[in-house]
Image (spheres, rainbow, N blue to C red):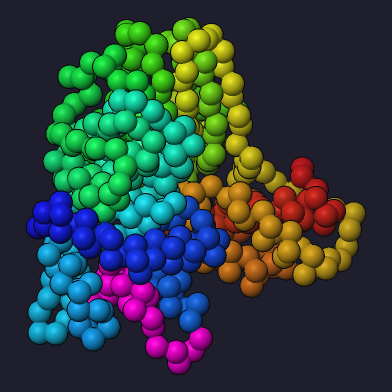
């Protein structure tokens, strides 16, 4: 149970004095995936010298972020009382125990989301949420702001830094509760009001700036999937409904996160140009992954709900939905500004093709250190989805077996064949390893060890 706004604000002030946001943000930047909101215990504890007791701030992170119960002696009494009053932890037999809400941090913002997302609850905080929050901070919305699909509330809290007022809506009551908690954890900005509401019932013309992050995972009809991600057969059910509503009114400033299938580029680009002739449209794609990977991630989530075999679900997804040319899943941020027509499209910095094949190149020997340095330098460009499917483990596999993998590729084996020989995990992890192998192939191709066929 969340405490009063005053009790949450008191807890937030004590957490800021302890600089919990700085600790979590700093440790995230030290990881390979700088967009992953949830750090492991190793990421938090590994930075301390061996044998050194955790600091009070690290104990707070263990309790609130990673979910480790800690003794009263590890937390200052006033901080512990404030966390209990705010409903963030409970106290029992000298132990502080974690509650439903898990806290993360990004760009100085504290964020609450479900600790057990995907099982019992649906308030999600993922890489996509942080990228959207960054886009909102960069847009610096002014005046009256509407947050559509507020989820955890990180976007509302980001908008409140510059807006005059923020109205946050979501169809999930739990999401509205989380938004209220997140905004209470970040006092000092614009007033944020929350409401369980569908955007179709809102007059968008009442707002100076609309920020939107709606579900965008392609899920065929009849397949169960969490509401926070289910975007319908092509992933655009709610997104397209919002576009139609927006296009029917006067031009507005909009900052939006959306997903789209496509081939070389998102298939909705021409649709957007036609829908918004009175806007300048700026689209930046930060993630482009094979549809096979998105399907595999979706299949494993569906399998966890239904008990089905993930490999069987992958086949059903492919058979039920995909048509020719839809080989890629794009995650993009879009800004609409009155005064078009103009479309400015920025393609992703990295595209990996797991369908490629290679042969031996002219160079017969390699400098392992040079190859590994170049490989690691490109990892920062890997898409978020890669890291969510055991990406760090895949990197270790490539580093350990680099010569064997390179030899298999030079012999004409596909990335799928090579990955299948190295991993027995589910479909998402297998495709993730394929991407790690393709990245190695591209590095070896640039050096001259391999040549594409």
Rendered view: 412 above or below 159 = below
Residue 54: within the magenta?
yes
Q: Is residue 306 left or right of residue 189?
A: left
The one nearer the camera, 69 or 389, is 69
Return the x and y of residue 427 as percentages of the image width and height: 43, 53
Residue 310 visible in this rendered orientation of the protein:
no
Q: Quadrant of residue 170?
A: top left
Residue 403 location (% of width, % of height):
73, 68
Which region shows up in magenta? 49-70
Q: In the drawing, does residue 285 fall left or right of residue 74?
A: right
**Residue in view at x 44 percent, y 89 percent:** 52
The residue that appears at 33% across and 15% down in the rendered structure is: 246
Residue at x-position 43% and y-position 78%:
45
Horizontal and vertical percent position of residue 283: 53, 26
Query: Residue 229 or 411: which is nearer the viewer?
Result: 229
Residue 293, magenta (yes or no): no
Res 199 → quadrant? top left
Residue 105 visible at all: yes
Residue 381 falls left or right of residue 404: left
């Amino acid at each position: 149970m969340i405490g009063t706004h005053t009790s949450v604000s008191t807890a937030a002030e004590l957490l800021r004095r302890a600089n919990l946001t700085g600790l979590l943000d700093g440790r995230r930047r030290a990881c390979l995936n700088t967009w992953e909101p949830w750090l492991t215990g190793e990421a938090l504890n590994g930075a301390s010298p061996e044998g050194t007791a955790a600091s009070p701030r690290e104990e707070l992170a263990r309790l609130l972020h990673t979910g480790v119960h800690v003794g009263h002696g590890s937390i200052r009494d006033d901080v512990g009382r404030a966390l209990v009053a705010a409903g963030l932890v409970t106290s029992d037999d000298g132990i502080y125990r974690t509650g439903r809400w898990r806290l993360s941090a990004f760009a100085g913002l504290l964020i609450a989301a479900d600790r057990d997302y995907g099982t019992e609850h649906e308030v999600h905080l993922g890489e996509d949420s942080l990228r959207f929050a960054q886009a909102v901070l960069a847009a610096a919305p002014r005046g009256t702001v509407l947050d559509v699909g507020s989820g955890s509330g990180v976007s509302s809290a980001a908008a409140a830094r510059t807006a005059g007022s923020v109205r946050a809506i979501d169809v999930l009551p739990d999401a509205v509760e989380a938004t209220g908690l997140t905004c209470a954890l970040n006092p000092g900005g614009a007033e944020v009001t929350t409401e369980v509401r569908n955007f179709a019932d809102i007059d968008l013309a009442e707002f100076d700036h609309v920020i939107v992050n709606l579900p965008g995972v392609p899920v065929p009809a009849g397949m169960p999937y969490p509401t926070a991600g289910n975007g319908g057969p092509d992933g655009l059910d709610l997104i397209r409904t919002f576009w139609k509503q927006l296009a029917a009114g006067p031009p507005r400033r909009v900052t939006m996160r959306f997903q789209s299938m496509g081939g070389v580029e998102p298939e909705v680009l021409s649709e957007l140009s036609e829908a918004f002739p009175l806007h300048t449209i700026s689209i930046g794609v930060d993630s482009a992954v094979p549809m096979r990977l998105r399907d595999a991630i979706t299949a494993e989530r569906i399998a966890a709900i239904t008990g089905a075999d993930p490999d069987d679900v992958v086949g059903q997804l492919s058979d039920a939905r995909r048509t020719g040319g839809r080989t890629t899943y794009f995650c993009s941020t879009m800004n609409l500004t009155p005064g078009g027509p103009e479309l400015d499209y920025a393609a992703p910095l990295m595209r990996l093709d797991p369908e490629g094949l290679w042969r031996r190149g002219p160079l017969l020997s390699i400098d392992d250190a040079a190859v590994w340095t170049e490989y690691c330098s490109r990892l920062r460009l890997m898409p978020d989805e890669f890291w969510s499917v055991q990406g760090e483990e895949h990197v270790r596999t490539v580093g350990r077996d680099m010569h064997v993998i390179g030899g298999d590729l030079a012999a004409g084996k596909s990335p799928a064949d090579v990955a299948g020989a190295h991993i027995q995990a589910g479909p998402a992890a297998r495709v993730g390893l394929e991407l790690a192998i393709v990245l190695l192939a591209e590095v070896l191709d640039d050096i001259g060890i391999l040549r594409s066929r």
